[in-house]
Amino acid sequence: MRIGRTLPPAATPIDVGAIASGLCGLFRGQQELDRFELELKEYFGVRHCFLVSSGKAALTLILHALKELSPDRDEVLLPAFTCFSVPSSVVRAGLRIRLCDQQPDNFDFAFAQLNALFGTPPAQAVVNGASHRPVQADEAAAGSRKALKRILAVVPTHLFGYPADVAKLRELIRDPGVAFVEDAAQAMGETRAERKVGTLGDVSFFSLARGKAFSVVEGGVILTDRNDLAEALNRLTDKLPRYGLLPRLKLIFMATALMLLMHPWLFWIPRSIPFLRLGETLFETDFPILKLSSFQAGLTRNWQQKLEKLREIRKRKVNRWIDILEAGGNDGSDLAGSRSLGLLRLPLRVSDEKKRAALLRESARMGLGIMPVYPTSIDAIPELRGMIKGGQFPVAESYARELVTLPTHGYLTENDVTKLSRLISRVLG
Ligand SMILES: *Cc1c(COP(=O)(O)O)cnc(C)c1O
């Protein structure tokens, strides 16, 4: 166990002022929630917004709503390397998981694999001379088309804050029965082609958990422009329970603890408490699905300015890391290619297993905040064995095996950067 200055791998500070506004929010009740909802609608330019207790609660409700609108469809297509909360939500919503592999140099879908799945619509097949193709191939294609009719939703995911190409996905999947659900949990405030992430699909969600782009201890936001979906979501969210007294006290306690303990001089404390399970990612389907509380809404006062400031800091650190990694000729930095993204953590590929283990061990010893990401791809989650559809996911598996992340938050000082880059060049060099 390390005692002393320890960098968290990701950090989204909550300050005293925010906690004061949170307590104010408690007294203002619904007004405070209405304010946050209105600000979100204005900022993103969307018609409908729903506030719930987490990102996974948000995704579960979205999937329930979609299922109500298309009862004959029951599959959700996910990237094979993503947060374990995502398949947890799919299972909680009573749906099936289909996976797609990802690209080796960003976390977007492997479009070739999707193309093989969704490509060759019937009309086009005839144009291309399908009559000369063997009958089995046609039957197989027809079979796969039938299988595709079960796909309810596809979840493009802006992992770490890299914006996924939702426009390309829409071009590729022309079935109007498939909904595009943006997982923008890690990407609040990011843009792609000058459009805000979270407004690119049919519906999207953000997470307001600790360590995300903006945090209120825990929380989830749903955005959509579709009236049919909003109606279904309205019905579903109306019925949701609120936080009880004890859970609200726990939120206040957690906000205060986060305010103090995220600081590098104190972070070693929560880090050394095993039951907090910091940094662990769990597959669990019995999470609460509640309305956001007015305390959490109160914590969001001035969120636009705060988010912008946090993103500016992260962008600067990301650019700093890219400069350093490029200068060092580090070949694991291909992921970092795009500058000026406010990534929550900077992913770095370390293919050599021994070097990666040494890097993680040394970082833990020195308190420098280098961390692995998700321990496996989604298909390897034991609870999901035998329940997954899709092919092979070699890239997703390599992400789980090889990635580590460097901190990009505001607690990272120039002195830390120097120590970290020395460590990286010593171990990987
Ligand atoms: C955090 C996260 C979620 C889930 O959000 P919670 O608020 O933690 O439930 C979903 N998807 C991704 C990519 C995430 O990082």
Image: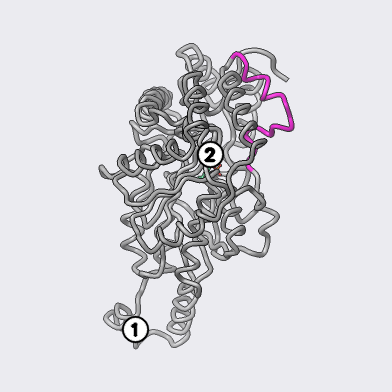
Which is in the foreground here, disc 1 or disc 2?
2
| Beta carbon of the mark 2 residue lies under 8 A of ligand 1 | no
User: Looking at the image, which is closer to me, 251 or 220?
Assistant: 251
**Lateral position of residue 2 relative to residue 130, left or right:** right
Whether 229 is among the magenta residues is no
Kindly identify the residue that appears in the image at 64 percent across and 48 percent down.
Answer: 287
Identify whether 419 is placed above or below 28: above
Mark earlier in primary sequence (1, 2): 1
* The one of 366 and 15 positioned closer to us in this rendering: 15
The local secondary structure at tag 2 comes to: loop
Q: In terms of depth relative to the viewer, which is nearer, 204 or 233?
A: 233
The percent position of residue 195, horizontal first and vertical second, equals 28, 45
Say which quarter of the image contains residue 265: top right
Q: Is mark 1 within 8 Å of ligand 1?
A: no
Amino acid type at circle 1 is: Ala
Give the residue at x 54% y 64%: 390
In the rendered structure, find residue 293 and report the number of the disc placed on it: 2
Pointer 1 residue: 130
Left or right of residue 238: residue 278: right
Q: Which mark is residue 404?
A: none
Look at the image and give the residue range highlighted in magenta.
Answer: 265-281
Q: Secondary structure at mark 1?
A: helix
270 over 68 or under it: above or below? above
In this figure, which colouring scheme has been used for the structure?
Answer: one colour
Residue visible at 37% across and 44% down in the picture: 163
The answer to whether one can see residue 206 in this image is yes
Residue 206 in the image: state x and y as whole percent: 45, 43
Relative height, residue 60 to residue 15 (above, below): below
Label 2: how many Cα within 10 Å (few below 14, some 14–19, many 20+): many
- Residue 295, given in percent of the width and then of the height, sits at 52, 33
Judge from the rendering whether residue 386 lies leftward or rightward of residue 114; answer left or right: right
Residue 272 x %, y %: 71, 24
